[in-house]
């Protein structure tokens, strides 16, 4: 039994990459947070909640398009983009066409 010269893997399981980091929220939680932000963004503060939903959805997808994607993350990403687009259109339309004249 010469595994590591006295430093076996049973004592330090995190050193070999066996357990993932638990410092932040997991992907499922980020997907749900993004979905809630996207739905709430349709009713209030869409210019803030839309990009927040995009960020949460993107992080929940693992920052890549390939592979398996949770459905909540994809919906949060799409609804967040729609929220942001509608907020930008609303803000552009609310300025009016005054051409600098009062």
Image: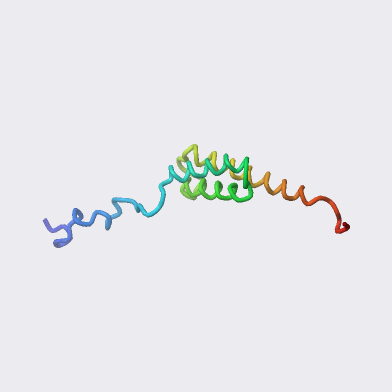
Residue in view at x 68 percent, y 44 percent: 86
Quadrant placement of the N terminus: bottom left
The picture places residue 54, in percent across and down from the top left corner, at 56, 47
The picture places residue 15, in percent across and down from the top left corner, at 27, 58
Residue in view at x 24 percent, y 54 percent: 13
Q: Is residue 96 left or right of residue 84?
A: right
Furthest toward the right, the residue is: 101
**Which of 47 and 78 lies nearest the eye of the viewer?**
47
Furthest toward the bottom, the residue is: 5
Q: How is the image coloured?
A: rainbow
Quarter location, residue 102 = bottom right
The picture places residue 48, in percent across and down from the top left corner, at 60, 51
The picture places residue 39, in percent across and down from the top left corner, at 57, 39
Furthest toward the left, the residue is: 1
Q: Is residue 65 left or right of residue 92?
A: left
The number of callouts visible is 0
Residue in view at x 55 percent, y 50 percent: 52
**Which of 43 and 15 lies nearest the eye of the viewer?**
43
Q: Is residue 5 left or right of residue 48?
A: left
């Amino acid at each position: 039994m010469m595994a590591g010269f006295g430093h076996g893997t049973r004592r330090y399981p995190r050193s070999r990459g066996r357990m993932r980091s638990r410092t932040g929220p997991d992907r499922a939680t980020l997907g749900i947070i993004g979905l809630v932000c996207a739905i709430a963004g349709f009713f209030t503060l869409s210019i803030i909640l839309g990009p927040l939903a995009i960020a949460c959805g993107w992080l929940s997808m693992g920052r890549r398009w390939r592979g398996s994607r949770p459905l909540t993350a994809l919906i949060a990403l799409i609804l967040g983009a729609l929220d942001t687009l509608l907020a930008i259109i609303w803000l552009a339309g609310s300025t009016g066409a005054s051409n600098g004249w009062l």
